[in-house]
Amino acid sequence: MDSKALITWIVIGIIAGFLASFVVGGGGLIRYLITGLIGSFVGGFLAQQFNIKLNLGNAFLEQVIIAAVGAIIVVIIAGIII
């Protein structure tokens, strides 16, 4: 993985975690990053399993939305478990 891909992945994670915090509750930068990164895996997995394609014309925006939905799911499940 090159540095550009890693930075892009981190930025998507932070944005997704930040968006998820609006839906399910606050947090800080570290929580945004962790939630967003885990959410990107969950959202990507679910989008692939259910063959979801957003077709927004912007790949970055599509990834952020999928990661944010995944992050929301992760936070809700974590809230139920804890």
Image (spheres, rainbow, N blue to C red):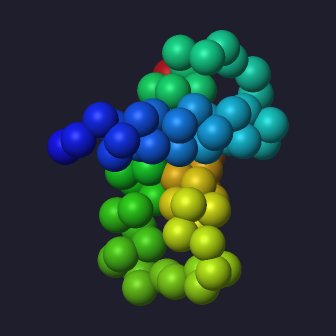
- Looking at the picture, how far across and down is residue 20, in whole percent? 68, 41
Q: Position of residue 52 (x, y in %)?
A: 49, 82
Q: Quadrant of residue 45?
A: bottom left
Residue at x-position 53% and y-position 69%: 59
Residue found 61% across the figure and 72% down from its top: 58
Question: Is any part of residue 20 visible from this angle?
Answer: yes
Look at 66% across and 80% down and name the residue there.
56
Q: Is residue 10 above or below residue 8?
A: above
Q: Quadrant of residue 6?
A: top left
In the depicted structure, whether residue 17 falls above or below residue 61: above
Q: Residue furthest right?
A: 22
Q: Is residue 11 left or right of residue 41?
A: right
Q: Is residue 39 left or right of residue 27?
A: left
The residue depicted at 53 percent of the width and 44 percent of the height is 12
Total labels drawn = 0
Quarter of the picture holding the N terminus: top left
Along the viewing direction, whichever of 56 and 19 lies nearer the viewer? 56
Q: Nearer the viewer, residue 65 or 57?
A: 57
68 to 75, vertically: above or below: below
Res 36 visible: no
Give percent across and percent down for residue 34. 46, 26
Using residue 51 as the reference point, say whether residue 33 is left or right of it. Answer: right
Q: Quadrant of residue 38?
A: top left
Residue farthest left in this picture: 1
